[in-house]
Amino acid sequence: MDGSRLSFVDKCMHVGHVLSSDLVDKAEILNKRNSFCANVNSVLCHFYKCAPLVRLKLLRSYCSDFYGSVLWNMWDSSIEDICVAWRKGVRRALGLPWRTHSVLLAPITGMFPLRDELLCRMAKFVLRCISSDNSIVNFVARHGVYFSRMHSPIGLNTQLCCKRYSLSLYRFSCINRELIGCSVFRDLSNGLLLVSFMNCYWPIVVWVIFHFCALQTLILLLITCVCCKLVACIFIF
């Protein structure tokens, strides 16, 4: 082009996003995971003297943007890699033992598990496209969700969202943070969270004994254990 020879590559970076020739999101997701890990290390390094709850708020504000995630293929196995990195970052921010069960993280932090957070953002994006005043955006979104379905990236993610939260496709518009919160905390009502807490209670006690400065973390865990039923009732009823 204009006397210059064009080069062909398998992937390239465009405005901060990795575009792959095979249209697979794996490289983009792993790039965002690496960026997340770097941001977490930076935040925890600079604010290591802050209280655990302050570090958690900083992690939420500066490390959890995940721009472009609304277009990811949520069925991709790489999603679990970034979810694992997120859970490790939350444990580090709160000063929790690495064996702390992942079920405990949602009620302790007041945040959705990352997979549910990403699905919530995706659902909100799709619903905005469906209700868009732009006729082209509106048509493409509706066709992908209701007609192309599994053959469309938007339709594929919509199907996963409905399956995860036990909704029919035509009730997809009902998805909001309250419904997702009800699903996330559903297990609390039958005592599964308490069982999970007891299973990992002993390493937490040992850790606190050898790290007496983490009294605030212990209090936070005890409050969570006592109030888990109340949290479940709030989200379910």
Image (tube, rainbow, N blue to C red):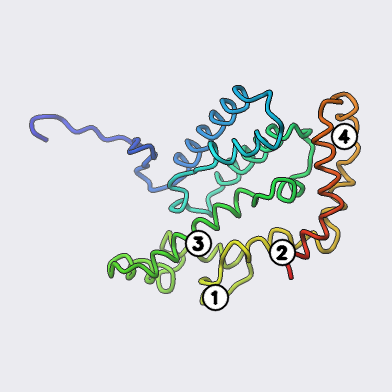
Q: Secondary structure at mark 2?
A: helix
Relative to 39, is 204 on the left or the right? right
Of the image marks 1 and 3, the number of the one nearer the N terminus? 3
The residues bearing labels 2 and 1 have C-alpha atoms spaced at a distance of 19 Å
Q: Residues within 10 Å of mark 1 (few under 14, many from 20)?
A: few
Q: Secondary structure at mark 4?
A: helix
- Residue type, numbered disc 3: Ala
Numbered mark located on residue 123 in the image: 3
* Residue lying at 34% horizontally and 43% vertically, measured from the top left: 21
Numbered mark located on residue 184 in the image: none
| Marks 4,1: beta carbons within 8 A | no
Q: Identify the image quadrant of the C terminus.
A: bottom right
Residue hosting label 4: 203
Q: Quadrant of residue 218?
A: top right
The residues bearing labels 4 and 1 have C-alpha atoms spaced at a distance of 43 Å
Residue hosting label 1: 171
Q: Identify the image quadrant of the N terminus.
A: top left
The residues bearing labels 4 and 3 have C-alpha atoms spaced at a distance of 38 Å
Residue hosting label 2: 235
Residue 116 in the image: state x and y as whole percent.
60, 55
Of the image marks 4 and 2, the number of the one nearer the N terminus? 4
- Residue type, numbered disc 4: Pro
